[in-house]
Image: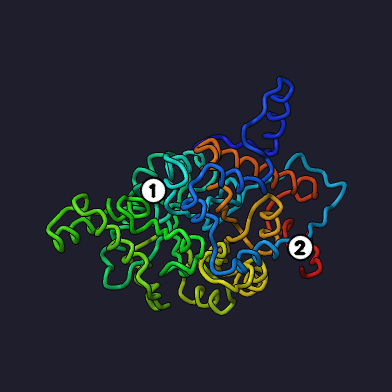
Amino acid sequence: MGKPVNPTPYTYLDKVYEAGLSDQKLPITFNCLEWESLAKETLSADSFGYVWGSAGTRETDENNHAAFRKWGILPSRLVRSKFTNLKTTLFGKEYDYPIALAPVGVQKIFHRDGEIAAARAAEKENVTYILSTAASTSIEDVARANGDGERWYQLYWPANEHHDITASLLKRAKDAGYKVLLVTLDTYMLGWRPSDLDHGYNPFIRNDNIGVELGFSDPVFQKHFKERHGKAIDENISTAAREWAHLVFPGASHGWEDIRSLQELWDGPIVLKGIQTVADAKKAVECGVQGIVVSNHGGRQQDGGVGSLDVLPEIADAVGDKVEIIFDSGVRCGADVAKALALGAKMVLIGRPYIYGLAIGGEDGVAHVLRSILGDFDLTLHLSGITDVTKKNLNRSVLRRMKDL
């Protein structure tokens, strides 16, 4: 990674308390449950509705949060440890922390600096950044902002007839230093999201580059658009936005047999995002991918779904020794990270919290959220007598199943 790592992220609180002696207080709360309401105060109704919104009645989103409350952490005492070793290894590479910034699109609707601010904060805090295909900043510009940071690329997968577009996106990502490919499986079209429908708001079809910049900056798409319309993209932005949105949200899913086409284009680790069943996890292993993300897209795509944490243990039991398991959906605090790792994940993705930080304070807001979650996570493990995040020490034995809520 690009910067030296503070081995004890919880020392962020030491700096805060020291500053408090001079009556200096950070402008953003440390209460993770208040970040959402603070972000709401700063955002338009459209923008807040987009990040907060979930499918249907929000049952899946609610189940995500309830799933964490079904587990309690059992601390061990008289464990000699100066601090917890938070390093983890995935795909043969050591990472400083077992968290990463989840791929979230259209970040310029939350703050004018958008993905640039988030990528910079991730690099400074030594946290892996994952760029969404639905970004409002190009692959190359985000890479420059991320500098020496670890970065992955998330693909919204065009239909097979647009294989050349897929190839172009992946080549650009590889050339720009993105090391791991995440392929989202559950969003080949946008879910039924009442908060967006109430506002008539779809950020991907408007007369700007929000959510479609990866297409607008792609040479293959530029060429196709010029040939089809006789005009450059910037001469017909509204049409170009709609065409790109239709490419990356084609309305129909790929099949398992199509994974091979991605393996021919990408020579690094491939991770399938959106796995919720043991059967699909086993198919992923059979296809020869290197990782899966147990995720329901934070409840944004399908209503009435099971919480992702509820299915994580059975998926980990079935394929945890054959593929790297990453977790996403419903994570809000350090204890949530600890529980997901104990139940079988090797890395945990942080989504809405860092976007709320972005809305509240730009790059500094994202950095504050990362420091807070890492500090909380570090201290939670340290005070529980858990000396590192390996499966030898952080596993189901440190949890107690609580009464179902």
Q: Is residue 65 placed above or below 160 in the rendered structure?
A: above
Mark 2 and mark 1: Cα distance apart in space: 38 Å
Element assignment for label 2: strand
User: Residue lying farthest top?
Assistant: 22
Foreground mark, 2 or 1, reads 2
* Residue 375 picture quarter: top right
Q: Residue at x 66, y 67 (%)?
A: 63
Label 1, on which residue? 177
Determine which quarter of the picture holds residue 161.
Answer: bottom left
Q: Estimate the x, y position of residue 389 in percent, counting from the top left.
A: 68, 53
Q: Position of residue 347 (x, y in %)?
A: 59, 56
Which corner quadrant holds the C terminus? Answer: bottom right
- Residue ID at (53%, 59%): 53
Q: Position of residue 224 (x, y in %)?
A: 19, 61
Q: Which residue is mark 2?
A: 71
Using residue 147 as the reference point, say whether residue 340 is left or right of it. Answer: right
Residue at the image point whose x is 33% and y is 67% from the top = 158
Decide: is 268 above or below 210: below
| Image spot of residue 60 (x, y percent) | 61, 68
**Dot 1 lies on which element?**
loop
